[in-house]
Amino acid sequence: MDEVILGDCLSALERLPPASVDMVFADPPYNLQLGAGTLLRPNQSTVDAVDDDWDQFASFEAYDTFTRTWLSACRRVMKPTATLWVIGSYHNIFRVGSALQDLGFWILNDIVWRKANPMPNFRGKRFTNAHETLIWASRSDQKGYTFHYEALKGGNDDLQMRSDWFIPLCTGDERLKGEDGRKLHPTQKPEALLARTILSASNPGDVVLDPFFGTGTTGAVAKRLGRHFIGIEQEPAYAAAARERIAGIEPLSRAALLTAPTKRAEPRVPFLSLLEAGHIRAGETLTDERRRHKALVRPDGTLGVGPASGSIHKIGALVQGLPACNGWTFWHAERGGRLVCIDDFRGTMRAGMGSAA
Amino acid sequence: MDEVILGDCLSALERLPPASVDMVFADPPYNLQLGAGTLLRPNQSTVDAVDDDWDQFASFEAYDTFTRTWLSACRRVMKPTATLWVIGSYHNIFRVGSALQDLGFWILNDIVWRKANPMPNFRGKRFTNAHETLIWASRSDQKGYTFHYEALKGGNDDLQMRSDWFIPLCTGDERLKGEDGRKLHPTQKPEALLARTILSASNPGDVVLDPFFGTGTTGAVAKRLGRHFIGIEQEPAYAAAARERIAGIEPLSRAALLTAPTKRAEPRVPFLSLLEAGHIRAGETLTDERRRHKALVRPDGTLGVGPASGSIHKIGALVQGLPACNGWTFWHAERGGRLVCIDDFRGTMRAGMGSAA
DNA sequence: AACGCGCGTGAATCTAGTA
DNA sequence: GTACTAGATTCACGCGCGT
C-alpha cells in the first residue's frame, strides 16, 4: 500500500489479495514490437514471422494475449464495484476494448483526451493525431460503482461533464527530466488527466492500482488527492524516479478534499416530518409550479386529490397522468404570495439536523 | 454507378467488380444493447431507442462474424489505394477496429466526431456520451491513398486538420421526415460529417461506396461534391427515400463546404480547467472583489464554504444570499498582493486554445 | 416583424435501498 | 433472488405559437 512494487506486473498482481482495489488506472505499452511477447509468454518463444501477413497476425495475437492476461489479473483484484481506466491510441485501443468486452467488463464510457498541443503530422499524409482514448469500465454490469456526478458538474459550470476532455500534454516543470535534462519517461501523462479520472471514480481513502506505473503519475495524483495507491513497475529507473517524486507530494487538506454528499447519500426526510416541524400544515393545498394541479395535504403526510390519496410521488404522478414523479420537486406551497418548492423545506430540515443526521 | 442497390449488402458487394471503388464510407449497425422504453427522461417521456431488427445481434461473436464478413467484401472491391471510413460508438467500434487490423487494413487515423448537441445522460451515472468515433483506414499498408492535406488545412485557418471534429447532430430541415412528421431513419448522419470525409479522402470523379446506405447521406454529399456513389440498402423505404433525396441534389461547381457550418461560439472553459492548467490551485481561497466573502477551491473544481459545496456560480449566490450569481466575474484570487478576477484566467486560456476548441 | 417561451428530441449498453 | 418503492435525473437546438 502506497508503495511502488518493482517487478513484473503479472506476478505482482498475483500476490495481491482478490477484491482489494477500488480503481485501476492502466497505461499499457502499445508498441507491439517492444517486448510484448516476452511479457506474456514467459515459457514460450515468440513465433517467428515467415511473411508480412503472418508476422502481422502473430503480433496482434501476441498483443491480445498479453492484454487479456493483465486485464484478467486486474479484474481479480478489483472489488465488485471497482472501475478500471485504460488509455491508448488507435494502435492498441481497439484490441483493449474488445478484450474488455470479452472478459465481462462493462464499458461505461469511452473518453477522448483532446490534446491542447499535439505533435503535428510532419508528412502531411494524415490528420493531426490530436487525441488519445480512455476506456472507463466497471468490473461487470453490476451497479454500485463510484461516480462523482455532482462534483464534476459543479466544476463544469453546472453542466454535465462530457466524454471529450481538453487537457494539455505533460510538459514544462511537470515533465520529469534526468540529469542530462532529457525526459525520463517517453509517455508521461499529465497529472490533470489522472486527476479527473481519480476525482470522478474514487473516494478519498480508496485504493488506486496502476499496473504500469512508469514514473508514478498515478501515485503522485492519488497521494495529493488523499487516495492510497499501489504501483507496479518493472523498470528500476522508473520505479526509483516514481518513489522520489511521490515522496515530495503533499496531500491536500481534508477540508479541500470534502465533496458535497450526493443527493442519495443525504439523510432521508419523510414528508410527514415537514408537517410535524410546521413547515407544511395539514389541510393546506399544494400546487405544481404553474398552478395547473393541486392536492390537499392530509395529516398523515399523504396528499389527496378527490377520492384518491397517496404519497407526494404517487399523487404527483397521478395528476400528471405519468407513471412516476418526484414529488419533492413537483409540489409547491404558497408562502407570502409566492410558490416555494417543498424540497426547499426538506433542505432546511436537513441543514437543521446537523450532526444528528 | 450513382444508383441505390436494393438488397443485402453482402450479395450486392459480391456482384461488384474487384478493385473498383476509391473510397468506402460505412455506417454499420452499432449493436446497441438496451431495449425500447427502458430509459426515461426526467419528465418521464421515453427515449426513442434504436431497437430495429437490423441492430440486433445475439452476441459479440455474432457481431464479429458479421463485421468481418462485410469488411472483407468491401476490401475486395476497394482499389489498392482506396481508403475506408467506419463510424461507430463504444458499443461496436472496438470490435470493428480489431477486425480491420486483423484483416490487413492499415489504420490511418481514428477521428472523433464531437457532437455539438449530444443527448445528455439522464440518470447522472456516466459522462455525457458526446462523441462518436470514425476509423479511417487504407486497404493495406501500401501508400498512395488520397488525402487533401492542403485543402483541409486551408479550410482550417491554415492549421492542420486535427483528429477531433466538432459538428452538430443532423436535425432540423436536414433531417428527413416521413409524412407523419417523424424521422425517417433513426441514425441519419449530418452531411457536414460526410463532406469532410469525402473532401479529404477522395477526388472529384471518384467512386464512393456506402454498403449501409440508409437514407443516402453519403450519396447526397458525394453527388453535391462531384463524386460518383454506389449505395446498398436492404430496406425499401430507406432506399426510396434516398433516391428521391439524391435526385434533388444539385452538384456544386467548386466545393466550398470544407468546414462544418458550425456557429463560432467562444469555447466554453470549465472552471476545472483553470485548476488543471495551474492558474488556480486546489486548496487556495477565493474572495469577492471587496474580500467580504471567501470560499475554498476544491480539487474537482467546486468551491466550498463550510459544509456547502457547489459550482462557482452556486456558491457565489449562496454567500451573497442571492438566487443567482455569475461566478466568473464574482470570484477573485490573490496574486502578488492584488486581486485578479478568475475571468481573466479564463480569457488567457481561451486565447491559448485557438481553433482547437 | 421581432422576440420570448414552451415543447419536442437526438446511435443510450442510464437507480438504489429495503422488505 | 425478487419485488416494491422512494425518489433522482437533461443539454443544445429547432420549431411553433403567442405577444
Image (tube, coloured by chain):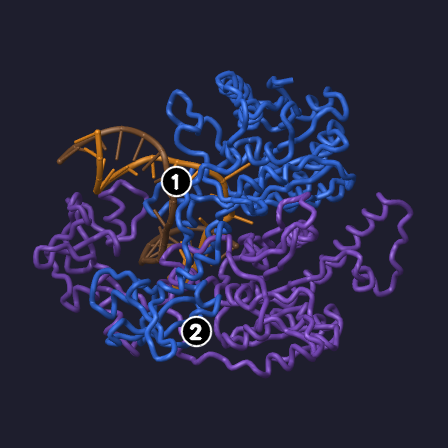
Chain colours: A purple, B blue, C orange, D brown
Mark 2 → mark 1, Cα distance in angstroms: 40 Å
- Dot label at residue B193: none
Q: Amino acid at mark 2?
A: Ala
- Image coordinates of residue B353 in percent, x first then y, are 48, 56
Could you say which is closer to the camera, residue A141 or residue A195? A195
Question: In the rendered image of this protein, does residue B125 appear above or below residue B292?
Answer: above
The residue that mark 1 highlights is: B46
- Image coordinates of residue B91 in percent, x first then y, are 58, 45
Secondary structure found at label 2: loop
For disc 2, the chain is B
Tell me which numbered mark, 2 or 1, is placed earlier along the sequence. 1
The residue that mark 2 highlights is: B282
Q: Nearer the viewer, mark 2 or mark 1?
A: 2
Discs 2 and 1 carry the same chain letter = yes
The residue depicted at 65 percent of the width and 39 percent of the height is B63
- Image coordinates of residue B214 in percent, x first then y, are 55, 26
Residue B292 in view, yes or no: yes
Could you say which is closer to the camera, residue B227 or residue B256? B256
For disc 1, the chain is B
Secondary structure found at label 1: loop
The residue depicted at 68 percent of the width and 50 percent of the height is A122
- From the image, which quarter does the N terminus of chain B lie in? top right
Q: Residues within 10 Å of mark 2 (few under 14, many from 20)?
A: many
Residue B216 in view, yes or no: no
**Number of marks drawn:** 2
Q: Amino acid at mark 1?
A: Thr
